[in-house]
């Protein structure tokens, strides 16, 4: 019985330190809390019908001017930010739109978390196709397991939400002259100081034609200024204005001139599609991860809108003597054709995703009708401190602490009672915690103990000790 009791006491003492460490120094834990909400469904019949009506309205071009002024600035940035691997440099970019920071690309989503919703400025009447920035409402709620937990923030929070995204499969490769053709015709116009060059780029994609004019300049001597910088004629084919509803893809023709002549005539096939994505909200940045293959091809109005945005970007990115896409490729991909094609694929995909986010913002800014919504779901992870684990063994830690604490209190209480009963007893009881405390505090017999003697340990064992004095003046003496 004694050996069993000794074993129990030894085990409790051994675990005492770790028990207190666990109790006083809890670990960082994440508390998952479910969320639910709704968002604009780009594939809903109601939205497709509304977008078709707006695009075909008499004032559609005028209505889109504010939105395309935003697109003019941001499409180039969205495309370049989407390029991750720049000639082996493994750079990562952030793209910001409407006060929201996206990791590389928007993924075609809108923020589903209020703290990440971006701009707080009211958009006013500039919604739909006219949207150029402003507050976009968020419709996501936290499903607290207990009412008392409502509003808990912890140390930090991050979120994962399953949402609808829009992206594109883009494949860039050299032109196949047996199926397609691409030609540029140039006409000079002499001015007083410079010569203006009018270029007409014509693309033929499997029998469908589209032409796009460009303008560059040369100096007065006739030396082409684009020989110093460069020119990249780019044409979307078929013409977005003549596309038919049976299309599911379109082509982007590109060719480099001047300092960009390393870019041989290239055709990028673009296949937009709706998909399901996991969106992570962490540290003020939104990251989008595709979790499945194509969900569905976008309906014709959305498909046409994406092609129109790409065609617009193709023309506005070309300046009189330079092209930022050409400069980017010169810096990061000119020496390797496969790398250059991969970067162009990311570039056009990033623009398609941004166009979707910009359109989704416009049609969500004033609230989304119920017939245009789809459900979303996710999890909020609250970072906090805690002790709970996946098993119930943590209870044993508290048991050890409680048992030892209880035993200590009982021993101290019993000693006090015995002190009252036998107040005149001068003997020293090494099992009495009160006596031990007095010895530690008062001392009194250090000189009688032979600590420096080789045989001191044996002599000290035969030394008789007792208390002398009363109350707080009690001290330990030998004899």
Image (cartoon, rainbow, N blue to C red):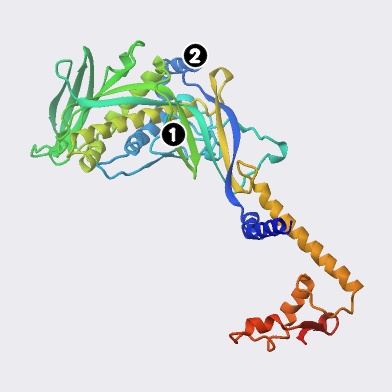
- Badge 1 crowding class, 10 Å Cα cut-off, few under 14, some 14 to 19, many 20 or more, is many
Total residue callouts:
2
Residue 437 locus on image (x, y percent): 75, 74
Residue 71 visible in the shown view: yes
Q: From the viewer's perspective, is residue 310 above or below residue 454?
A: above
In the shown orientation, is residue 181 left or right of residue 370? left
Helix, strand or loop under label 2: helix
Screen quadrant of the N terminus: bottom right
**Residue at position x 31%, y 37% in the image:** 83
Front position in the image: 235 or 466? 466
Circle 2 sits on which residue?
45
* Dot label at residue 288: 1
The answer to which quarter of the image holds residue 315 is: top left
Residue 26 locus on image (x, y percent): 61, 53
In the shown orientation, is residue 85 left or right of residue 407? left
Q: CA distance from mark 2 to mark 1?
A: 25 Å
Residue 154 locus on image (x, y percent): 61, 47
Front position in the image: 227 or 151? 151
**Residue at position x 19%, y 20% in the image:** 202
Q: Nearer the observer, disc 2 or disc 1?
A: 1
* Dot label at residue 29: none
Mark 2 or mark 1, which has the lower sequence index? Answer: 2
Residue 194 visible in the shown view: no
Helix, strand or loop under label 1: strand
In the shown orientation, is residue 412 left or right of residue 45? right
- Residue furthest bottom as drawn: 447
Q: From the viewer's perspective, is residue 4 above or below residue 219?
A: below
Front position in the image: 475 or 156? 475
Residue 104 locus on image (x, y percent): 38, 38
Evaluate if marks 2 and 1 touch, with contact meaning CB atoms under 8 Å apart: no
């Amino acid at each position: 019985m004694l050996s069993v009791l000794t074993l129990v006491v030894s085990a409790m003492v051994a675990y005492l330190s770790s028990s207190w460490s666990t109790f006083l120094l809890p670990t960082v834990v994440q508390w998952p809390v479910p969320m639910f909400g709704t968002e604009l469904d780009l594939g809903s019949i109601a939205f497709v019908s509304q977008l078709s009506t707006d695009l075909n309205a008499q004032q559609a071009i005028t209505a889109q001017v504010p939105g395309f002024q935003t697109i003019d600035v941001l499409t180039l940035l969205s495309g370049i930010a989407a390029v991750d691997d720049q000639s082996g440099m493994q750079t990562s970019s952030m793209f910001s739109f409407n006060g929201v920071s996206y990791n590389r690309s928007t993924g075609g989503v809108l923020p589903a978390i209020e703290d990440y919703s971006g701009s707080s400025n009211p958009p006013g009447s500039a919604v739909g196709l006219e949207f150029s920035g402003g507050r976009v409402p968020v419709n996501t709620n936290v499903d607290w397991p207990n009412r008392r937990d409502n509003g808990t923030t912890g140390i930090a929070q991050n979120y994962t939400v399953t949402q609808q995204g829009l992206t594109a499969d883009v494949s860039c490769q050299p032109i196949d002259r047996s199926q397609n053709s691409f030609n540029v015709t140039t006409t000079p116009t002499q001015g007083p100081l410079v010569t203006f060059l009018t270029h007409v780029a014509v693309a033929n994609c499997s029998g469908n034609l589209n032409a796009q004019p460009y303008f560059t300049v040369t100096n007065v001597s006739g030396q082409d200024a684009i020989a110093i910088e460069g020119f990249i004629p780019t044409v979307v084919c078929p013409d977005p204005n003549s596309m038919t509803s049976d299309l599911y893809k379109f082509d982007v023709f590109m060719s480099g001139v001047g300092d960009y002549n390393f870019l041989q005539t290239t055709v990028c096939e673009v296949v937009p599609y709706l998909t399901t994505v996991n969106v992570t909200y962490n540290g003020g940045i939104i990251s989008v991860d595709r979790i499945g293959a194509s969900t569905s091809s976008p309906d014709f109005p959305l498909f046409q809108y994406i092609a129109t945005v790409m065609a617009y970007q193709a023309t506005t990115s070309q300046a009189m003597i330079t092209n930022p896409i050409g400069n980017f490729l010169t810096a990061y991909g000119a020496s390797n054709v496969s790398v250059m094609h991969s970067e162009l694929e990311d570039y056009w995909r990033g623009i398609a995703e941004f166009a979707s986010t910009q359109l989704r913002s416009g049609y969500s800014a004033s609230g989304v009708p119920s017939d245009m919504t789809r459900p979303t779901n996710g999890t909020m992870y609250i970072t906090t401190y805690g002790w709970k684990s996946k098993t119930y063994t943590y209870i044993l830690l508290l048991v050890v602490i409680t048992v030892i604490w209880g035993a200590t209190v009982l021993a101290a209480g019993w000693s006090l009672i015995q002190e009252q009963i036998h107040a005149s007893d001068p003997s020293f009881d090494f099992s009495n915690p009160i006596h031990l405390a007095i010895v530690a505090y008062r001392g009194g017999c250090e000189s009688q103990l032979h600590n420096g003697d080789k045989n001191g340990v044996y002599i000290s064992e035969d030394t008789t000790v007792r208390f002398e004095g009363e109350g707080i003046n009690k001290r330990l003496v030998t004899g």
